[in-house]
């Protein structure tokens, strides 16, 4: 079955009960772009999408790390697709244009864009330098906006395309541990941008959604090596524990495959129940 098609044939369940058709969580032959792919969630996203059959195109600034991740994707999560990568700063428009051109050259279309590239800086709103806030907005928000503008022109398959922006629970919850004014502004902007682009591009067959993770073990969170931080996470989550790196896999595949063809403009919060309080 084509990765973006949902079968209309009913399936038969136990005792002859007709089960609803269930979409395939596959991306065979599709082209997926993942930014910020040299570590953390981006590296994980690349491996998951490749294992689901996609051609993956990775982008990040650290060349050696990016090459190592590309090799790791092929070896540890073997899939049917190619793996390509581009080294560059995504706040530079030339880099963004080259990335989209590279992805589009594989099959003529782009099917999935995961806007994951991001950075974080702590800053109290009274003293946080505006230069730092500008860097946060350029990297976390404006690069995602511009890449979406460029990529959507290549989402020409009749089945449409899927853009997944990476937000954060910080877009919804203030914290009692880290002052993150500029970072929060950038991630709240991602939530609003997701909703607006979904509204504007829905009639083109483009779905735009976001993932808002809680604290996952990445370089940005210190790999959760600080036991005080781990205890803080336990105290703030309904599940009473930090996340495992694989616990975004299902959410990512849901948003990028035929499993969510009627879902757009939404931000899926994956935080262990932090926002339930």
Image: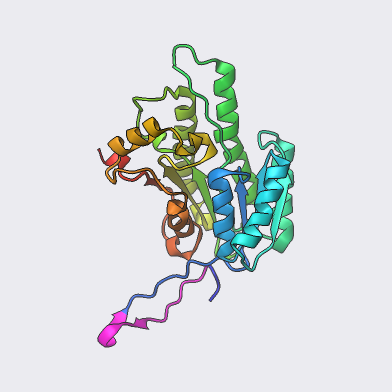
Q: Which of 224 and 178 is in front in this view?
A: 224
Based on the displayed image, in which of its 4 quarters is residue 136 positioned? top right
Give coordinates of residue 158: x percent, y percent.
58, 65
Based on the displayed image, in which of its 4 quarters is residue 157 positioned? bottom right
The answer to whether 129 is drawn above or below residue 190 in the figure is: above
Residue lying at the far top of the rendered structure: 127
Asked if residue 121 can be seen in this view, the reply is yes
Q: Give me the residue at 63% from left, 67% from top.
A: 29
The answer to whether 168 is drawn above or below residue 30 in the figure is: above
Left or right side of 99 for 47: left
Based on the displayed image, in which of its 4 quarters is residue 216 positioned? top left
Q: Nearer the viewer, residue 167 or 263?
A: 167
Q: Give me the residue at 59% from left, 33% from top.
A: 139
Prevailing secondary structure of the magenta residues: loop
Left or right side of 29 for 276: left
Give coordinates of residue 13: x percent, y percent.
31, 82
Give coordinates of residue 119: x percent, y percent.
56, 32
Residue 248 magenta-drawn? no
Image quadrant holding the C terminus, namely top left
Asked if residue 156 can be seen in this view, the reply is no
Give coordinates of residue 98: x percent, y percent.
74, 45
Q: Give me the residue at 66% from left, 33% from top.
A: 91
> Coloured how?
rainbow
Q: What stretch is highlighted in magenta?
A: 4-18
Q: Give me the residue at 45% from left, 46% from top.
A: 211
């Amino acid at each position: 079955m084509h990765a973006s098609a949902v079968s209309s044939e009913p399936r038969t369940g136990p005792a002859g009960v007709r089960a609803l058709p269930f979409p395939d969580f596959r991306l065979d032959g599709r082209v997926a772009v993942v930014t910020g792919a040299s570590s953390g969630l981006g590296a994980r996203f690349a491996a998951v999408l490749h294992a689901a059959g996609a051609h993956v195109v990775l982008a990040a600034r650290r060349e050696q790390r990016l090459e190592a991740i590309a090799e790791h994707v092929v070896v540890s999560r073997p899939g049917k697709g190619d793996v390509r990568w581009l080294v560059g700063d995504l706040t530079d428009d030339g880099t963004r244009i080259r990335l989209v051109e590279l992805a589009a050259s594989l099959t003529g279309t782009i099917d999935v864009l995961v806007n994951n590239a991001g950075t974080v800086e702590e800053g109290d709103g009274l003293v946080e330098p505006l230069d730092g806030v500008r860097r946060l907005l350029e990297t976390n928000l404006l690069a995602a906006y511009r890449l979406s503008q460029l990529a959507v022109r290549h989402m020409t398959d009749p089945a449409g395309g899927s853009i997944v922006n990476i937000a954060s629970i910080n877009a919804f919850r203030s914290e009692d541990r880290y002052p993150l004014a500029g970072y929060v502004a950038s991630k709240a902007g991602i939530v609003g941008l997701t909703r607006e682009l979904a509204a504007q591009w829905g009639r083109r067959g483009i779905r735009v959604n976001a993932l808002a993770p809680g604290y996952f073990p990445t370089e940005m969170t210190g790999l959760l090596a600080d036991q005080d931080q781990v205890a803080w996470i336990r105290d703030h989550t309904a599940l009473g524990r930090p996340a495992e790196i694989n616990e975004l896999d299902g959410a990512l595949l849901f948003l990028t495959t035929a499993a969510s063809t009627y879902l757009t403009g939404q931000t899926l919060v994956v935080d262990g129940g932090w926002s339930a309080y």
